[in-house]
Amino acid sequence: MIDALEYRNPAELPAGKVLVIGSGQTGSQLAEELFLAGREVFLSCGRAPWLPRRLDDVDTVTWLARVGFFDQPLNALPSPAGRLLANPQTTGAAGGHDLHFRTLQRLGVVLLGRLAGVDGHRASVVDDLDASVAFGDARWAEWRALLASELPTRGYAVPELPIADPFHYGPVTEVDLHDIGVVIHTTGFRPDYRWIELPVCDDVGFPITDAGTSPIPGLFFCGVHFMRVRRSALMFGVGLDAAIVATSVAWSAAREMPGHRH
């Protein structure tokens, strides 16, 4: 077994079939790349949202930005743990195209439910693929409704918003690992700030901040997922947060200067 961080290209992997565990962006993209390289690929799937890469030839990220999706604050999530949800299944490879359970299935990747355990050379799989697909479909339905309702109020015509085709599959509950040349683990990451030996994080593991300012005097954060809003950890959003944090740092430093009146 290797972690996704160790993966470089299909040619460096041992011969044989490939089992990819995890179906977020990384797992889906590796499954596609490996299949196109001639490998037989099994993808153990979890719950991840999906969206089309483009709508009316405009990137879907642009459409979502137009309706303020990336400006949603943390309290817009059902719970703080929502920050751990996988990013939407999609890809920028070859100029960007749709990539999700249905496209992978049509390609020829064998989709499985969640890996339940391994006993010798037998890997048992939960028959919950339909639930994972339904979860992703529900997220896309929510985004479709958001675009349909908000775009006209902001002066944009509503693009064609595709509805997912019915999903059909044959349940697989066991995989023979004798034929598997390599297993790639792609189940994502959690925040880990244990190297800061101070009580700075919430129960989920994210830093506690007010727009980047920690309750611990002199400690600041930036680039944290959902630090202020959804775009806080994205390239097109972190700049505003950085400016806010820089102002807070400067203000804090000025307060500590000799002669400053509190």
Image (cartoon, rainbow, N blue to C red):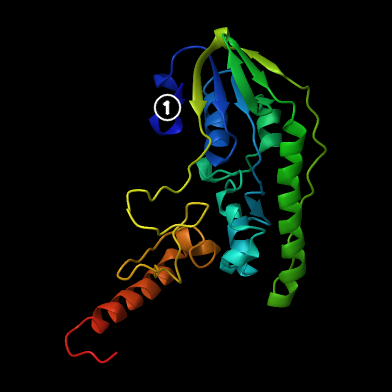
- Residue furthest right as drawn: 166
Residue 7 or residue 93, whichever sits in front: 7
- Relative to 215, does residue 90 appear above or below in the rendering? above
Closer-to-camera residue (122/101): 122
Question: Which residue is identified by label 1?
Answer: 9
Identify which residue is drawn at 32% across, 53% down. 197
Image point 45% across, 49% down: which residue?
A: 191
The tally of labels here is 1
- When asked about the image quadrant of residue 129, the answer is top right
Can you say which quadrant of the picture contains the C terminus? bottom left
Left or right: where 4 falls relative to 20: left
Q: Say which quarter of the image contains residue 121.
A: top right
Whether residue 238 is situated above or below residue 179 in the rendered picture = below
> Is residue 59 in view from this perspective?
no
- Image spot of residue 239 (x, y percent): 40, 68
Q: Position of residue 35 (x, y in %)?
A: 57, 24
Q: Is residue 243 above or below residue 98?
A: below
Q: Is residue 195 left or right of residue 201?
A: left
Q: Quadrant of residue 215?
A: bottom left
125 vs 217, left or right, is right
Q: Closest to the observer: 51 or 93?
A: 51
Query: Can you give x and y, in whole percent of width and height, for residue 70 in the image?
Result: 57, 64
Residue 149: where, in percent of width, then height?
77, 68
Element marked by disc 1: loop
Furthest residue in direction left, as rendered: 258
For the point 55% across and 34% down, the residue is 27
Q: Amino acid at mark 1?
A: Asn
